[in-house]
Amino acid sequence: MEQMRYEAPDTVDAAVALLVGAGGETRILAGGTDLLVQLRAEWIEPDLILDVKKIPELTEISKENGGFRIGAAVTGAELGEHLGVKKAWPGVVEAVELIGSVQIQSRATMGGNLCNASPAADSVPALIAAGATAAIAGPNGRREIPVEDVGTGPGRTCLAKGEIVTSIFLPSRPAHSGDAYLRFIPRTEMDIAVVGAGVSLTLDGGGKCSAARVALGAVAERALLVDAAARALIGTPVDDAALDNLAKAASAAARPIDDKRGTKEYRIKVSGVLARRAAQAALERARQS
Amino acid sequence: MAKIHVTATVNGDEVEFLCELEETLLDVLRDELHLTGSKEGCASGDCGACSVMLDGRLVCACLVLGVEMEGRSVETIEAMAAGDELHPLQQKFLEHAALQCGICTPGILVAAKALLEKKPDPTETEVRFWLAGNLCRCTGYDKIIRAVLDAAAEMRVS
């Protein structure tokens, strides 16, 4: 067997060139909190490990068109310390901060959480609800796609050979907007979501919901954008009747598996409950913003 | 393939070491540099027994590759006491009997020190959440939490 190689380029172009030129399996090393576990367990035996943390573009948070562009290798701890992002998108930040312990937060990244493509990834439903996009660089140039289109199944993404996610863009938000992410786990910390729900909504001057996005995690092969649940809110004052409809739509969209963390029936029910609570939290934030 | 040459700062001293690509920072600390205070519990980032400070951030040394250390700075449990003088956290862990087998203790001390540097007056809840990434299978945690709170109180006075 050929030996594993380690490269830490300092530009996106060099990273793409290394990935394109590499034979066999390649893996991106950002925070390493998934990758090192997979290496140690010998689930993967890559020929090339590409450390992207030396690429400035991937490690910065910058303002762009009233929103924020967050480098794919920015850590959870760095994101949580960024007051601007926290104020604009508290639901995204709270989702990222739910990932693991303080130790994990020091290393784990949103880019990694997205590209590891676990259906239970905490940041992904929050990003989808936020209408975030992922910037991708590859041998054919750059493209930007909705976050919901990145993951295609457990451990699988739409990225082609040589492509990497370079950043995630959170758009500017209108006034009276709020977002929230909630997950259910059987304990208070350090566990993988049984169900996760992200909601982002905007209120008009009269307090009616003018825009909404709802996403669910851990109830399908990838995080789901649930349009029907968003439609249940739009045009309403987000009252009990609207929240009931949102919960029904969320449960109807859930198509989970049975596993040791929860049964199918339970996850379907909790999808509605959590989506409702996340919508109430987002509503509260929208009223205060 | 030849081992990879890395220069890093460990507990304030510049060190050079050779490591295989598969070796983690924890492997390097224990096997190359013979700093065996950091322990391997789970080797998957769940237990926190290998907690160290990497460029001022609390990390699990088992989740960092040795080759990533080039130019970076790490601080381990070995740097906690000043010579023979224990850090207040270490002293309070002894007074409160906040350890039994001791495997988790270095990681918990490093993690607790990081908390008190960030937040000198944490609540009990804050201590418990901060230490959620450090597992102890002996004490039931209460003595650990009391020792951290007591050390925090003493450090605020002194």
Image (spheres, rainbow, N blue to C red):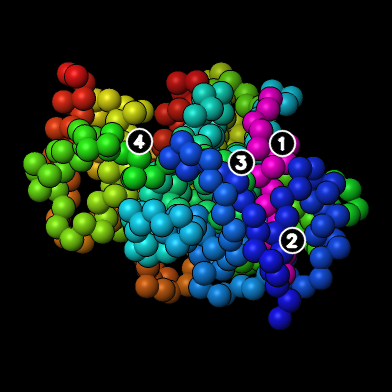
Residue shown at the point (28%, 34%) measured from the top left = B82
Amino acid beneath label 4: Ala
Which image quarter holds the N terminus of chain A?
A: bottom right
Residue A58 is covered by the magenta coloring: yes
- For label 2, the crowd category at 10 Å Cα-Cα, with few meaning under 14, some 14 to 19 and many 20 or more, is few
Check if mark 3's residue and mark 1's residue have beta carbons within 8 Å: no
Task: Look at the image and say whether residue A192 sits in the magenta stretch.
Answer: no
Give the side of residue B142 with respect to residue A76, left or right. Answer: left
Query: Could you tell me the amino acid type at mark 2?
Result: Cys
Crowding around mark 3 (Cα neighbors within 10 Å: few <14, some 14 to 19, many 20+) is few
Among numbered discs 1 and 2, the one appearing first in the sequence: 1
Q: Secondary structure at mark 4?
A: helix
Labels 1 and 2 share a subunit = yes
Tell me, yes or no, whether dots 1 and 4 are on the same chain: no
The 10 Å Cα crowd at callout 4, few under 14, some 14 to 19, many 20 or more, is some
Residue nearest the observer in this picture, A227 or B92: B92
> Is residue B100 visible in the rendered structure shown here?
yes
Q: Secondary structure at mark 2?
A: loop
Name the amino acid, label 1: Pro
The residue that disc 2 covers is A158
Q: Secondary structure at mark 1?
A: helix
Label 1, on which residue? Answer: A56
Secondary structure, mark 3, is loop
Relative to A140, say whether B150 is above or below. Answer: above
Q: Which residue is mark 3?
A: B71
Span colored in magenta: A47-63
